[in-house]
Image (tube, grey):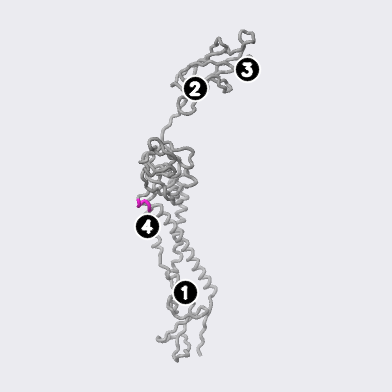
Amino acid sequence: MVSIAVHGGHTPHDVLHDVVDWGRVVVATAARAVVATLLGLALWSAAPALLGWHPTTVMTGSMAPRLAPGDVVVSRPVAPAEIRPGQILLADDPDQPGHLRMHRFVEPGPDGTVVTKGDANPQVDSTPIERSAVHGVGFLRVPSVSTPVLWVREGRWVEVGTVALALVAVLLLCTVDAPLRRRGPRHRGDGGHAGSGGPTGDGGREALIASAAPPAVGAHSVPDRRSSRPVPRHVDERGRAARRAAVQRVPRVGQTGVLGLVAVVVGASAVLVPTQADAAPFGRTTGTAVQLTAGTVPVVTTLSCTDSSNGSVVIGWSYAGDPPKSFTVTDETGAVLATTADGQARSATVKLSSALALGTRRTVQVQTNAAAPGAWTSTQSAGVPIQFTSLLGLGLVSGTSCVR
């Protein structure tokens, strides 16, 4: 009588080994999902250029919070007649030849031009753009895909190196299940082939009956009740064989294939890299490189005071600059005493209020109001003193006189 030892179930070592194998599969699948997502974003940001569209990198946050630096915006070509207020336009920057501006169309400008403005900017752009200079209208946003480009432009090499190392790590994790995909069931010689179609028993045992071939030398056999010929009986671990066979049926994508695909997409992205609008597409206040000279409004000189017979004084001055808009006469408190009608005047009549006490003194100053747009004024001139006093020394009639 021949005894056969049939082992059922899994040992703790086998269970731990299976858990590690499944962990490799999960980690590799997650890493491939990350790579696929990155490749998809790169393709969405660069491939539209093949259709004649314009991918552009957001460099700053003048269109925040709608768009963030590092986003890529794809602009669709549009005819000048189709441009409407509210659209985001990519156009040649009239303030910087050879550069681009990408801001929102806020209102029509003079002579059919377009006035643009960044959503986060307090004022409209300084120069309107021609409709013929518009390249396209913002159509698609790919978030954060060009953030490394922004970091390189700003010299943030620590962040660039960190992202590069993280990408290498993800690519390596894509291959952690390579041994499982190269390796079949652990006991191939025992008949554990996937898809053999042999009858299976319970408790993880699989029996294969060979009706024609004789049993192998040294193999344990049991008599078959239907025949006097002994048949071999092999015991395999069905659960493990099935799992390994399922893993083996997954298409074999080796490390070389993954790296090759990444290289192709990265190369295509480098060729079709999104352009950068110097006016920071959707996102930055325009900075025009110009030379500015500080301007000042000239101050009047040589103030004089002359008493008048009607209880007032005449304040005179000299002025050597271009004719201003007007002159304003004030006292030391800032109260306006007189304003000239134009910039040609060189004197003004001043009479203090009768509500002042007799003997009250005031220091009169003259301020120049420039003719340029805005409220440009000069600093106050040197003062000349005047006082509120009585006339004829009677105290009954009051007036204004110069202080000698």
Count neighbours of disc 3 (C-alpha within 10 A) and say few if under 14, some if 14 to 19, many if 20 or more.
few
How far apart, in angstroms, are the residues tagged by discs 2 and 3? 27 Å
| Part of the protein shown in magenta | 47-51
- How far apart are the two marked residues, 4 and 2, measured between alpha carbons? 69 Å
**Residue identified by numbered label 3:** 356
Label whose residue precedes the other's in the sequence (2 or 3): 3
Dot 3 and dot 1 residues touching (CB under 8 Å): no
Marks 3 and 1, Cα distance to the nearest angstrom?
109 Å
> Which of labels 2 and 1 is toward the front?
2
In space, the residues marked 3 and 4 are separated at their CA atoms by 89 Å
Tell me the kind of residue under disc 3.
Answer: Leu
The residue tagged 1 is 242
236 is higher (above) or lower (below) than 116: below
Along the polypeptide, which appears first: circle 2 or circle 1?
1
Instruction: Please state the horizontal and vertical placement of residue 307, each as a whole percent of the image.
Output: 55, 11
Query: Are the residues tagged 4 and 1 within 8 Å (C-beta)?
Result: no
Residue 195 image offset from top left, x and y in percent: 43, 76
The amino acid on which the numbered mark 1 sits, given as a three-letter code, is Ala
